[in-house]
Image (cartoon, rainbow, N blue to C red):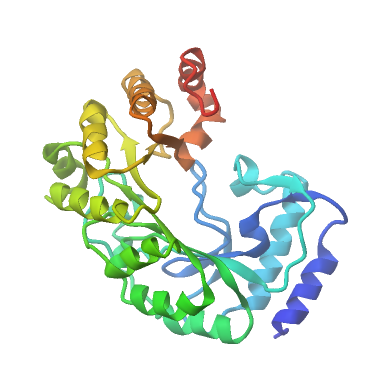
Amino acid sequence: MMSPGEQLEKWADNQPDGPYWSCSYIESGLAFNVGSITACCVTQYKLRWPFLAQFRGGELPLDRIMQRKEQMVRLNQQKQYPQCANCSRLKYQTWTPRAYLFDTLLIANFRYCNIACKYCAIAKRRANRKKAYDLYPVVKNMLEGSILAPGGTIHWGGGEPTIFKDFEPVLELLRPCHYHHIIYTNGVVYSRQIEELLRERHATVTCSVDSGTRETYRILKKKDYHEVVWENIAQYAATGAKVTAKFLIMPENVHDVIPFMEKVMVAGITSVACDLDCTLSMVPSPIIDAVKSFIQNGRTHGLHVSLGTFLNQILREPRGSALKEALIVDNLLPGT
């Protein structure tokens, strides 16, 4: 196997001269899933994540990973890599040479979760029953082997990261390296370590509550943690760091936009995001109206309003044409 330095030299030699189509995840990211490593966890409609290698712990298959990344770059220049074709992260630019193979990790081990979201495809497939591998020694070896850059970014998803057994040990391992942690949590379990990272401004938190009432929460999550979740994210928001309350709009919760905004204001949260189910084949009128209401109410309350990954993706496709037109008419697209 080639050393990390040799891998970097080979990567630089094999890339196109000047600007080319790529993204930060292809260039220097790595996503750990239940039984595989992918370039990212960005879901495209009816497509799997950009696969790099099978993985169940142990030594990273670096040769295989870098070969697949080189192949992704080549195919993207020809617009022949469908997983990236409609992704907003794909950019045509000159990419800066780097000193480490990776500076961004996405940790999406679906082995552990404590709720059962109605829209979660993983829960439907019961993938959380698969055996998890130990992530701590993998990350430790990456640091010690100069594979992972200090001062990078870690995205924590899942599943639920706060009940993932390697969550706290990996946080402690990376603390001296000044990593920034982007944490996607359902908010059921309160984490003192997350609170500390927020106070140190080394983390942001996004919590997809998806409801403003206890009844809707129970329908969507199959659990009765509604009030606990709002209390927990209010404590996170009290640190003054960026905490985002997310609302994935579905037929079951279109009536909860106003109650959701009321909960946000009580919790002292200043950032909200709305998103859609990535599997939607078209966007029906009730959901269009709910998206409009969400953006209008968020702006009225002086909140920072953002659109989620899947909503942005849908807006770029024919299935989102009616929604896009409605948002343009009412000056509700970002930047308007």
Q: Residue furthest top?
A: 329
Q: Position of residue 315 (x, y in %)?
A: 52, 29
Can see residue 253?
Answer: no
Image quarter for residue 125? bottom left
Q: Position of residue 170 (x, y in %)?
A: 41, 77
Between residue 61 and residue 235, name the one nearer to us.
235
Indicate the position of residue 105 as horizontal and vertical percent values: 52, 66
Q: Quadrant of residue 235?
A: bottom left
Tell me: 113 left or right of 200.
Answer: left
Q: Quadrant of the N terminus?
A: bottom right
User: Where 336 falls versus 96 (above or below)?
Assistant: above
Q: For this rendering, which residue is in front, 172 or 6?
A: 172
Instruction: Look at the picture and state if 30 lies above or below 247.
Output: below
User: Which residue does the image show at 43% across and 26% down from the upper left?
Assistant: 282
Q: Is residue 251 visible?
A: yes
Q: Residue at x 51, y 35 (%)?
A: 312
Q: Total of numbered circles in the picture?
A: 0
Residue 99 in the image: above or below residue 331: below
Q: Which residue: 52% across, 47% down? A: 47
Q: Is residue 40 left or right of residue 23?
A: left
Residue 161 shown left or right of residue 232 in the figure = right
- Residue 175 position in % (x across, y down): 45, 76
